[in-house]
Image (cartoon, coloured by chain):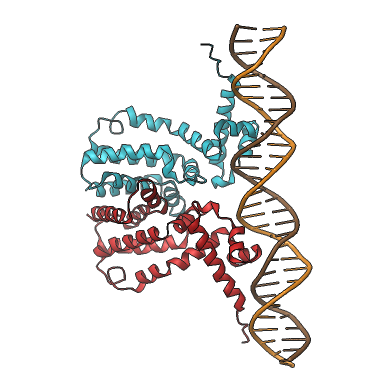
Chain colours: A red, B cyan, C brown, D orange
Amino acid sequence: MTERKARADAARNREAVLAAADELFARSDSPRGVSMEQVAAVAGVGKGTLFRRFGDRNGLIRAVFTARSEAVRAAVESGPPPLGPGTPARDRVPALLDALLGFKLDNRHLSVALEDAGSGSPYEAEHYGWWHGVVRDALAEAATVPDPAFAAHALLAAVRADLVEHLAAVEGLSGEEIRGRLGEYVGKVLG
Amino acid sequence: MTERKARADAARNREAVLAAADELFARSDSPRGVSMEQVAAVAGVGKGTLFRRFGDRNGLIRAVFTARSEAVRAAVESGPPPLGPGTPARDRVPALLDALLGFKLDNRHLSVALEDAGSGSPYEAEHYGWWHGVVRDALAEAATVPDPAFAAHALLAAVRADLVEHLAAVEGLSGEEIRGRLGEYVGKVLG
DNA sequence: TTACGATGTGGACTGTCGGTCCGTTTGGTG
DNA sequence: CACCAAACGGACCGACAGTCCACATCGTAA
């Protein structure tokens, strides 16, 4: 029964690393410009600690991403309409995609870093599976599209981080403009 | 006027490198598993030569990709309907996307390698700009969608290499199944 | 309070890889 | 055949992900 309590310094370090990584990814132009050594240094922690806690580079990025996206996830899983469950499917699909887009706009660097993903496609990340499931189910319930699973993939692809980044940075669209266009597009797909 | 003729060995080496890279990308599971040194070795060429000809890793991948996609490009630019110009826009859009999907299915490794892209998003590659232009124009002509530029991005996103790879490898769909679903989806978008 | 061992720590070290540099070779030209 | 720009190749460099292990620290039980 004597379960050793987790050490306090470990938790503190974990937070420090998460904060440092978040910070650095936000500052750097390209996620590849951020090295693990930098993260460790800024967090005031040794490299060994970093790898012990997060396994590898991807693990770290995923951890930061997960922490950041907790709020949206909660809103979708148990928030009020139109995002939460119990919304008419027809209205929920656009709301879901808009929320995801909003999140990516607010966390561009981080999202790009995650999809950059080193090895392993974004489609292996558990968070993608989760979004796909939610959107697919909503589409199925709306029943306006022949193959909900495929349509969910296709719609999610329309808000991929690097596309969003391109629209914002290269084509110079504002967040609101992108949201508007996505909304129209989703409307068209829903028929 | 005395223009020196290009050296024959240079051309030969260029081809050797292209072939070696193609080969290696096809064999390897992940594009990152292929190093420049390997390519050089298989091509029977020094590393210096490799970099002199192609600039950097991305340059090499782009060159291989460009060489491979010459045929599709030609078919779109000056081939017979429904791919070539002079096709009713309403029919051309699905044909374009199907052709692009077909190409990616036939060249999965290479396409993934290109989108992997090291630094720099796929949206910076000139070939993306070209496809986007063609699809956008066709959509504009068809006039069934409010914002052709955005819709073109969204539709092209639906055939991104890593998504196609995921559908094929993880979800186990055959090429024909993917084509079918994409066709339905495009139909829905065109309204 | 103290002694002890599980847990955590940090940074030196390693292997790999992209990219550069430069002395040498080679193919075309006159 | 002599010449030289173009092409070559591989030793070399710096950076970085990931490993390893001697050492420090926290929580526990006596």
The front one of A177 and B37 is: A177
Q: Which residue is located at x 52 percent, y 36 percent?
A: B59
Q: Which residue is located at x 25 percent, y 47 percent?
A: B147
Reply above or below: C28 against B40.
above
Q: Which residue is located at x 37 percent, y 51 percent?
A: A168
How many marks do you count on the picture? Answer: 0
Give how far across and how far down residue B151 sits, in percent: 29, 47
Give how far across and how far down residue B111 sits, in percent: 46, 42
The front one of B13 and B7 is: B7
- Residue B158 can be seen in this image: no
The front one of A80 and A20 is: A20
Reply above or below: A132 against B82.
below
Give how far across and how far down residue B87 sits, in percent: 25, 32
Q: Is residue A130 left or right of residue D29?
A: left
- Residue A66 can be seen in this image: yes
Q: Is residue A179 left or right of residue A5?
A: left
Q: Quadrant of residue A45?
A: bottom right
Q: Is residue A184 left or right of residue D5?
A: left
Give how far across and how far down residue B184 sits, in percent: 28, 48
